[in-house]
Image (spheres, rainbow, N blue to C red):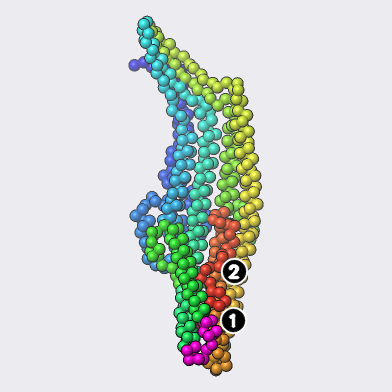
Amino acid sequence: MRRLSTPLRRIALAGICAFAAGCASFSPDGGYAGVRQFAQQRTGDAIPASAPGTDTGNVEQQVAALLAKPLSAEDAVTIALLNNRGLQAGYAELGIAEADLVQAGRIANPVLSFGRMKSHEGVEIERTLMLPVIGLLTMPVATRLERRRYEQAQLRAAGEVLRTADATRRAWYGAVAAQQSAEYMEQVKNAAEASAELARRMALAGNWSRLQHAREQAFYADAVAGLARARQVRTLEREQLTRLLGVSNPAAFTLPARLPDLPGAPREVHDAEAQAMGNRLDMLMAQKELAGLASSLGLSRATRFVNLLDLSYLRNTGETGERATGYEIELQIPLFDWGGARVAKAEAMYMQAVHRAAGLAVDARSQVRESYSGYRTAYDLARHYRDEVVPLKKRIADEQLLRYNGMLISVFELLADAREQVVAVNAAIEAQRDYWIADAALQAALTGSGDAAAAGTATPRAGSAAPGAAPAPH
């Protein structure tokens, strides 16, 4: 058996050492542990211990247990993090980034070429073993670059987790409020139907004019339309929550009858802007991007003149049978392209990232201030409706009922005051919903997830009663 020649042994030894130094392997969980850590530090939600999709049977059992009882906001978030298909598809990006990292830590395979030429004098054989030297030299830099990209992918995945949790929480508040409004509008419609029938009978008896009768019929018609709109809003909100939960049927879960009560006092957030700067995932991603582009810029500058360097070992057999060995170095000569364009592109991309990060910092500070202002305003409005407006409307209705029982006012005046109470109750439901959505928006602004710009001020629901919608039930 022929022993390898000294040059070939050196090339093989260099390749083995480089392979041993740069060989990378995949993590057992695909990088999910880092994602879970990032997300867990920024939210109080129960982040699944294992990546969704890894244990389907266990996930189905957990989801079924949570769906068997009235769904709370925390349970809804847990189901979404376990069962949301879009979130699970996003983890594939993490796997792609990890594959790129592992690939960067492995040297390119050597190239073996074999040539055989036959002439009248005999057969000539050429053998070449080529090793990409430039890849070996730049492997440490390339590996660091891919590691930063992998860390960015982990931050993006953690951001998707937080965005899914935020969207699910908002959808839950919207669905519960829509259900609450629809049930209330059902009562309003029934009361309006009864008053319309009373008006019809009084008009037939000659006790009411046609104008009064028409007014009550119009109120009843408005109540029917308001109930239809409220039911449609309830369907839309419930379907949105269904999509986020990843369940196939909106009837698979039940919601509580009403929204959670307001807390005794609004939460105080000290140094909110400083917290956002150190805690937001988008700011951390921008920092990783800057570090990665800085490394990429250094690599571009280092290889601007030479980006192709291959070393080959040759072993040829001539036509007469004699053997020849030697080396071959393939080097790109920077004659026409001096690499200036590649360096200029890398510098432009780096400066682009610098300005983008600076703009992101300005936007983040503004979003935190806006979200906190919206949160405090929503809390004050919800408490105002709970402590002032609704009790006053109820007190007025009770006083009017006493006067009606004492035959001091007519039933028409009693119904007019009851209609104003309907407006106050619907506005109170919306104010309570807006508070909880504003609370979620503030959390999103502090963590850089979700639509942080939305301070939680929601548009009025279609089921809200107009000032002349219908009388309230008694």
Q: How far across and how far down the image is residue 348, in percent?
A: 63, 37
Residue marked by disc 2: 379
Task: Determine whether, in the image, residue 331 is placed left or right of residue 114.
Answer: right
Residue span colored magenta: 202-216
- What's the residue type where badge 1 is placed? Leu
User: Mark 1 sits on what residue?
Assistant: 392
Label 2 Cα crowd, 10 Å radius (few <14 / some 14-19 / many 20+): many
Residue 136 in percent (x, y) is at 50, 28
* Residue at the image point whose x is 46% and y is 35% from the top: 103
Earlier sequence position, callout 2 versus callout 1: 2
* Element type where label 2 sits in the image: helix
Left-right relation of 444 to 96 = right
- Residue 193, position as x, y percentages in the image: 46, 81
Residue under the point 47% across and 64% down:
237
Which residue is painted at 37% across and 10% down in the image? Answer: 118
Q: Quadrant of residue 129?
A: top left
Picture layout, residue 274 above or below residue 175: above
Mark on residue 238? none
Quadrant of res 13: top left
Magenta stretch encompasses residue 29: no
Q: Amino acid at mark 2?
A: Tyr
Q: Nearer the viewer, residue 470 or 6?
A: 470
The answer to whether 168 is drawn above or below residue 192 in the figure is: above
**Residue 7, percent across and down?**
46, 17
Residue at point 45%, 72% (across, down) = 257
